[in-house]
Structures are given as structure tokens and as C-alpha cells.
Amino acid sequence: QLQLVESGGGLVQPGGSLRLSCTSSASGYPISYYAIGWYRQAPGKEREFVSSISWSGSTTSYVDSVKGRFTISRDNAKSTVYLQMNTLKPDDTAVYYCAAKSGAIVVDPQRYDYWGQGTQVTVSS
């Protein structure tokens, strides 16, 4: 079964950058053939869609609040999806999750079948 692991979170000052990674912790179950979504959840708020990428990398989607600042990409040879986050703001503070599904990318988190445990991103001076 696919098991996702996020990494790369941490504490960063406003205006700084982080790169999150999402990979599979189970050998023999690469994420290469799955659409991947990134979501985030801040304390007291609902889980929010951030970005998604098709299995081939040819199609991507972003929530308006991160367009121009975040970039999603993937390296299927390494079975890894990245979320490059630049010009970070305090409002970006949240636990970030990656999720996987077969087929096309979607925004609805209930359409994703596999989820990681999340990585904390804190943007603060």
C-alpha cells in the first residue's frame, strides 16, 4: 500500500523559502503514477487545497493565494514531488500534507486515497 512521507518543513522568517518533499516510504510502491496534491491546515481552520500535479507533471494547479510564490514539481525517477515555497508569509503557517490519487488532479481532498502525516511550516520573525 502506498505510504506517503512529507519532509522539509521548519521555521522560517517572512520572505524566506522552504522546499517540501513528498515521497513513498514503502519500497515497491512509487508515487510516479499518481496525481499528487498538497494541502495545509492551520490551527482552528479547515484543511485547504494548496497545489496539485498530474502524474506526468504536465498539469498543475494552485490556490490563488500561493500563485507566483509556490511551485509544484515532480521527479518520477526519484518518486518524489516537491513544493517550492518562496516569499513565505505568516499566513502560510500550517501543517502541510501531501496526498495521492489515481487519475486526474482534483481540488476536493475527499477524492484522494492516500495521505501523509504532515510536516509543520512556521513563518515567523
Image (cartoon, helix red, strand yellow):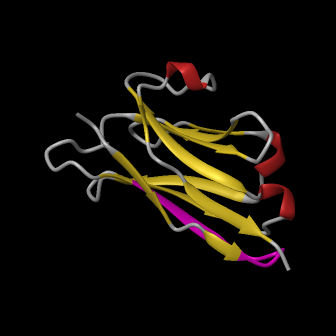
User: Is residue 19 a member of the stretch shown in magenta?
Assistant: yes
Please say if 62 is above or below 101.
below
Place residue 87 in its image quadrant: bottom right
On the rendered image, what quadrant is the C terminus found in? bottom right
User: Is residue 5 a member of the stretch shown in magenta?
Assistant: no
Residue shown at 58% from the left, 26% from the top: 109
Tell me: 106 left or right of 45.
left
Foreground residue among 70 and 40 = 40
Tell me: 82 left or right of 120.
left
Residue shown at 40% from the left, 22% from the top: 103
Q: Position of residue 2 (x, y in %)?
A: 28, 37
Q: Residue furthest left?
A: 28
Q: How many marks?
A: 0
Residue shown at 14% from the left, 45% from the top: 28
Please say if 102 is above or below 55.
above
Q: Position of residue 18 (x, y in %)?
A: 63, 71
Q: Which residues are magenta?
A: 12-22
